Structure formats: C-alpha cells, structure tokens
Image (cartoon, helix red, strand yellow):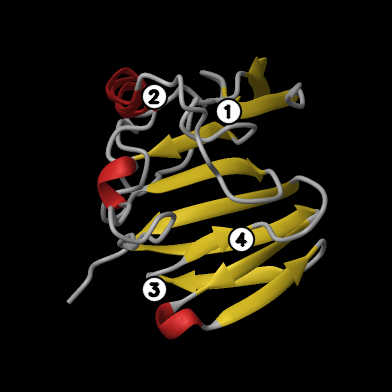
C-alpha cells in the first residue's frame, strides 16, 4: 500500500521576534510488518510545557507517548480488517525496529488483548476519513466516522477498523498525571 504524503510546516520567532517559517518538509511514515498497511506519522512533540516566544526548533520528545507536561501530534492510518502479520515476518526484529521508531508504544499495548492500550494522556482525536470503532472496557464499542471527534481521557481502549476503507485519525496527546 502506498502511504500518503504528509507535509509539516513549523513556524517560530527569529532573533528580532518576527514570525517565520523555520521548517517545511515531508514527514515519513512509520510502518511495520507486524501491522500491515498501517502507518504512523510523528508530526511534532515535546517533553515539557511550551514557553513563548519559541524559535520553532525541535524539542526533546523521545517516547512515543508524552510524559507529564509533554505533548505529541500524530496521524495514524488503520486499514480495514484484522491486523494479522504475514507468517514470514521476523517478529523479534520487527519489535526492535518499532521500539526504535516509536519508543515505549509497544509497552503500552496489552499482550493478551491485541490493540488494547492505556496511556497517561488526554488525547484529542479527529477521524478524518473512513470509519473506525473505538472499543473500551467490557467490549463497549462506538463507531466513528469522518468528522467525529473523541476526547480520550486516559482510558483503556483499542481502535478497530470494521469498515471497507482505510481510516485516518489525527490526534494530539497531552501528558497527564494518573493518580
């Protein structure tokens, strides 16, 4: 499957305080043989609360999900059907590659409930295209379509595409304290 082109434009302030475009480039998708036809685009992130003015240079954002006071901006595409890796995938190598590209993401996944995960974040999610089912505890399911939004308050969940076309989700995750 060919993945879409995603262009990221970043603004910042120059040394005189004037607004400028400081970066303009395509963002390459993260893909894995473990999740055929899925793609994740890490668009921006930071591990600390922002201060302004900002020169627009990248900040530390190592882990895939944000720490307290951190944030992440991402796009995910989910193909229809069950995510079944081909039998010839080297699982250990694919997991190592995912950990390099999306540090900590697989650790949030529940090994005995594929796709289920919980993060310490408040997530704002927009369904851009296609259809996806949000699955919560006890099998509660909500079908979402283009234009729907989800405010994900750190709950255990999974995204499942039971539709007929690839679903695109845009999300902003803001790190939170879990007490």
According to the picture, the residue beneath numbered tag 1 turns out to be 12
Q: Earlier in the sequence, mark 2 or mark 3?
A: 2
User: How far apart are the alpha carbons under marks 2 and 3?
Assistant: 24 Å
Q: Earlier in the sequence, mark 2 or mark 1?
A: 1
Front position in the image: 112 or 143: 112
Residue 97 rendering spot, x and y as whole percentages: 35, 20
Residue 97 placement, left or right of 81? left
Q: Position of residue 159 (x, y in %)?
A: 56, 60
- Kindly identify which residue carries mark 2: 101
Taking the image as drawn, is residue 34 in sight?
Answer: yes
Residue 68, given in percent of the width and then of the height, sits at 26, 56
Q: State the SS at label 2.
A: helix
Q: Residue placed at 38% from the left, 38% from the top?
A: 46
Q: CA distance from mark 4 to mark 2?
A: 21 Å
Residue 7 lies, in percent from the top left, at 72, 24
**Mark 3, residue position:** 155
Q: Judging from the image, what secondary structure is the residue with disc 3 in? A: loop
Which numbered disc, 4 or 2, marks the residue that appears first in the sequence? 2
Residue at numbered disc 4: 125
């Amino acid at each position: 499957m060919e993945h879409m082109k995603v262009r990221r434009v970043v603004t910042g302030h120059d040394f005189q305080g004037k607004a400028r475009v400081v970066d303009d480039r395509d963002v390459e998708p993260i893909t894995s043989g473990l999740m055929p036809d899925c793609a994740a685009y890490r668009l921006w992130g930071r591990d600390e609360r922002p201060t302004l003015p900002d020169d627009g240079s990248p900040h530390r954002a190592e882990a895939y999900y944000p720490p307290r006071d951190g944030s992440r901006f991402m796009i995910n595409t989910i193909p229809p059907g069950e995510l079944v890796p081909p039998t010839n995938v080297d699982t250990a190598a694919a997991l190592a590659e995912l950990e390099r590209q999306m540090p900590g993401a697989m650790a949030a996944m529940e090994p005995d409930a594929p796709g289920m995960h919980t993060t310490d974040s408040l997530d704002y999610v927009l369904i851009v295209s296609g259809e996806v089912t949000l699955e919560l505890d006890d099998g509660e399911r909500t079908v979402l379509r283009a234009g729907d939004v989800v405010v994900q308050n750190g709950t255990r969940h999974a995204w499942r595409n039971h539709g007929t076309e690839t679903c695109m989700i845009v999300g902003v995750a803001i790190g939170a304290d879990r007490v």
